[in-house]
Image (cartoon, rainbow, N blue to C red):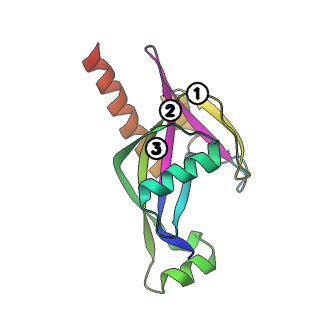
């Protein structure tokens, strides 16, 4: 079975008492375009199963905590390879992208071939690097949740 008609987005972060850092990834294709980890479901995967797999495949991170975000966008199918579009059917023009915050335990990243590099960044730095609005919206939501929780716990 091929790629399922949805996408997942994973915003990896490290948080300690004094700051939050987000990991942005430089794409291999197109070169240098920064985004968070993204990918599609395979087989019979649910979005949470897909995001766990994608995070491990693209960053090597395991033992992470996954938090579903409310942020949801729809992606035009014309950006995907023809074989995916044909498998999804001729009446599928957009697919949903489900977003997740991913708390990881270490800043060690093992890149996949999909990426040429990564950067740990503050919220403002990450926001300025990201290309896609869906990535910026998910970052905003996650950062708001993390900083709100931090202010409540102070």
Q: Earlier in the sequence, mark 3 or mark 2?
A: 2
Tell me which segment is drawn in magenta.
8-26
Residue sitting farthest toward the left: 152
Q: Quadrant of the C terminus?
A: top left
Q: Secondary structure at mark 2?
A: strand
Q: Marks 1 and 3: CB-CB under 8 Å?
A: no
Q: Quadrant of the N terminus?
A: bottom right
Residue 6 visible to an observer of this rendering: yes
Q: Which residue is mark 3?
A: 136
Q: Earlier in the sequence, mark 1 or mark 2?
A: 2
Foreground disc of the pair 1, 3? 1
Q: Position of residue 55 (x, y in %)?
A: 56, 47
Position of residue 93 in the picture relative to residue 55 (left or right): left
Q: Earlier in the sequence, mark 1 or mark 3?
A: 1
Q: Marks 3 and 2: CB-CB under 8 Å?
A: no
Which residue is painted at 36% across and 46% down in the image? Answer: 68
Cα distance, mark 3 to mark 2?
14 Å
Q: Does the magenta run of residues contain 13?
A: yes
Q: Secondary structure at mark 1?
A: loop
């Amino acid at each position: 079975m091929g790629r399922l008609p949805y996408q997942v987005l994973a915003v990896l972060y490290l948080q300690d008492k004094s700051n939050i850092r987000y990991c942005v990834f430089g794409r291999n294709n197109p070169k240098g375009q920064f985004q968070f980890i993204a990918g599609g479901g395979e087989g019979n995967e649910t979005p949470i199963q897909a995001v766990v797999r994608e995070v491990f495949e693209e960053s090597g991170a395991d033992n992470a905590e996954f938090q579903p975000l409310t942020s949801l966008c729809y992606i035009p199918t014309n950006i995907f390879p023809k074989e995916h579009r044909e498998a999804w059917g001729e009446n599928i023009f957009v697919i949903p992208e489900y977003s997740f915050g991913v708390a990881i335990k270490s800043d060690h990243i093992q890149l996949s071939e999909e990426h040429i590099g990564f950067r740990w960044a503050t919220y403002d730095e990450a926001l300025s690097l990201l290309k896609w609005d869906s990535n910026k919206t998910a970052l905003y939501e996650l950062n708001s949740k993390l900083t709100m929780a931090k202010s409540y716990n102070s």
